[in-house]
Image: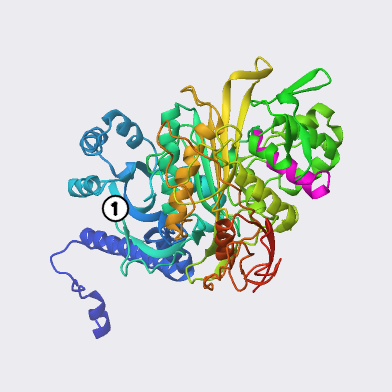
Amino acid sequence: MSPSDADATRPVKAMTPGVSRAARLRAYLTGGIVMAGLCGVASRAWSLQVDDGDKYAALAERQHATTLAIAAPRGEILDAHARPLAVSADVDSIWANPHEIQDVTATSEKLAKVLGTEAGVLEARLGGDHKFVWLARHVTPEVGRAVREAKLAGVEVAREPRRWYPGRTLTGPVVGRADTDGNGLDGLELSMNELLTGRRGTEAALRDARGHTMLADGIAGASEPGATVHLSLDSSIQAIADQALAARVAETKAKNGVVVVLDVETSRVLAMSSYPTYDPNVGDPHGARNRPVTDSYEPGSVMKVFSVSSALEAGAVTPETEIDTQGGRFTLGPNTIHDDDHDGILDIGGIIKRSSNVGAAKIALRLGRDKLYAGLKQFGFGAKTSIELPGEQSGRVRDGSKWRDIETATIAYGYGVMVTPLQLAAAFAAIAHDGLYTEPRIVDAVTDADGQVLYAAKPDTHPAVSARTAHQMMTMLAGVFDRDPKHGGTAKTIYVPGFICAGKTGTAHKWDPVAKKYDPDRYLSSFAGIAPLAHPRIVVIVMIDEASNGDYFGAKVSGPVFAAVASETLRYLGVPGDPNAVAAPPPPGSVVTAPKKAPAVVARAASPIESAPVVAAADATPDFRQMGVGKALDLARAHHLSIALHGSGHVVAQEPPPGSPSASRVTLRFEP
């Protein structure tokens, strides 16, 4: 046997002594399986990390990373002195993720005690298949703190902006309100909503294992706040108007009322009151609305101002024209027009002073329907003013070419035509501003967060009538306050403490749409006034609807509101009082005498620095030279003179000249 054969027959020594062959086979098989599994895992890992790595990285990012919407604060609304009328502040709101709530019933019961609501209502909300549901919006700080301390799974407290109105009822219908989500619902909040609404921002955030949002570095302020709206409205004047109106509506047991105060020169709204009003902080206005723009009325006798002005402008009459009012009864076809007084022949000023329907009707018929229609349109009637407020009505003035004679006559004294209080205020401002009509505005400007102007008021202007006609009408409107016991004006009982004013009363029967006739027991009582007479600063319109305490004439119902608003507003504005004004009504039973001569008023502007008057002898024409308008008017009253003023500034010429024999009328020419 060779050595090689011996090696071949020698037994092989096992690698694992003591382990059976079968056991080794199982071990090899198990190792192979494990190796195959590891290879599969490695292959899958390669696929996830390399082949599909980008895909799954994006999925992971979407799961843990999120984009948080940042609510933008709504812009502020400020009055003329930058006092806030509408602001936004963050408050707590409660929300939940129902998927994270394990015991809906228990959570609902705990929340109901904190939120003060029914557990069943909360359970219905939390039982839905949603990941987000609001439970309570804009809660008090105490409620928000209590919810946080309760640490209820799936229930969170978020901060979101809420709208606040510091003035409460002061400017409710004008400013309006916004809903819980910051959308304007009415008033300026609605009309300026696009500018007030800020741009919502976004911020990167992470979600934890429970799905809660986390901001590692806080909110970086990515949202853009809304613009700031600057109003012409003055909160102090608004308060004056609101208080006077509310008190008078209560005293007269009226249905509602409105007051509008305009600046004469610019037609900027200084106050716009409606009663009843509402507090935007507490929600539903319950029918209260901004009546000066949303409601239109048949105004009654205040319209005589514009029909007569149109006739003066067209030359159909002059101030000296006399009209036979026929004892207050005028038959036109099958219709009869009546006056409350029974006058005979009146000049044009007398028709305004005595508020003669017959006189106004005859003037309108003399003017003609086409010219009367054109005149009313020049004063802005029948068209929206385009003020920055929602819901404005255009009123109604039918096409003049279709008027019958009776319509021409009745429209002249305020029936058959519909106007808004704001339209009426703007038209009276035109009379006070030398005949220049300016569209009324309540928004002065809108600015962004950087102070850049996004909107600035640019109202259109046009001559409604000439300055001469406006001056003539102002003198006639002053006569409405004539206190002669027998032949005084319709406003002879109205006293504006400290000031002499011009104005017009209005009393109109209301139309009954059911009976299709004018109701003999329901009235709209109005007063339109300009103050002060010498240098008009403000126009005040007062309308009180359906007074029911027995009085219904405009002077008695609405006149006291005008007196209070005009006097207090002028004092607030720093306008000096007139020493010739009656401070208060005379005691009951006393005799009131008429002034010797009503002042003629035709100019507005006066220099703040004026020369002392040079007074001539008692029987000579005084020296008006170098005087401002105010001093000239005072001197003219002292000498019982009527004056015609031309221009503005200081007197540079007068006719007759100083020292000449005394005359009843003096013409003064002013230059800056």
Q: In the rendered view, does 545 fall on the left or right side of 386?
A: left
Question: Is residue 183 among the parts visible in the rendering?
Answer: no
Q: Is residue 314 covered in magenta?
A: yes
- Residue 73 lies, in percent from the top left, at 42, 58
Choose top left, top right, bottom left or bottom right for residue 81. bottom left
The percent coordinates of residue 227 (x first, y second) are 50, 62
- Using the rendered view, name the quadrant where residue 65 is placed: bottom left
- Count neighbours of disc 1 (C-alpha within 10 A) and say few if under 14, some if 14 to 19, many if 20 or more: few
Q: Going by the image, does 504 lie left or right of 172? A: right
Q: Is residue 308 left or right of residue 402?
A: left
Residue for badge 1: 210
Give the colour scheme shown: rainbow
Please tell me whether residue 648 is drawn above or below residue 527 in the rendered image.
Answer: below
**Amino acid type indicated by mark 1:** Arg
Outermost residue on the left side: it is 18
- Image quarter where the N terminus lies is bottom left
The kind of secondary structure the magenta stretch mainly shows is helix
What's the residue at 28%, 60% (across, down)? 30
Residue 182 in the magenta stretch? The answer is no
Return the x and y of residue 514 as percentages of the image width and height.
Answer: 65, 16
Q: Residue pushed farthest bottom? A: 3
Does residue 93 appear anywhere in the picture?
yes
Query: 451 and 398: which one is in front?
Result: 398
- Which span is picked out in magenta? 301-319
- Please state the horizontal and vertical placement of residue 473, each as a whole percent of the image: 68, 48
Q: Identify the element where label 1 is drawn.
A: loop
Q: Is 665 in front, or is 575?
A: 665
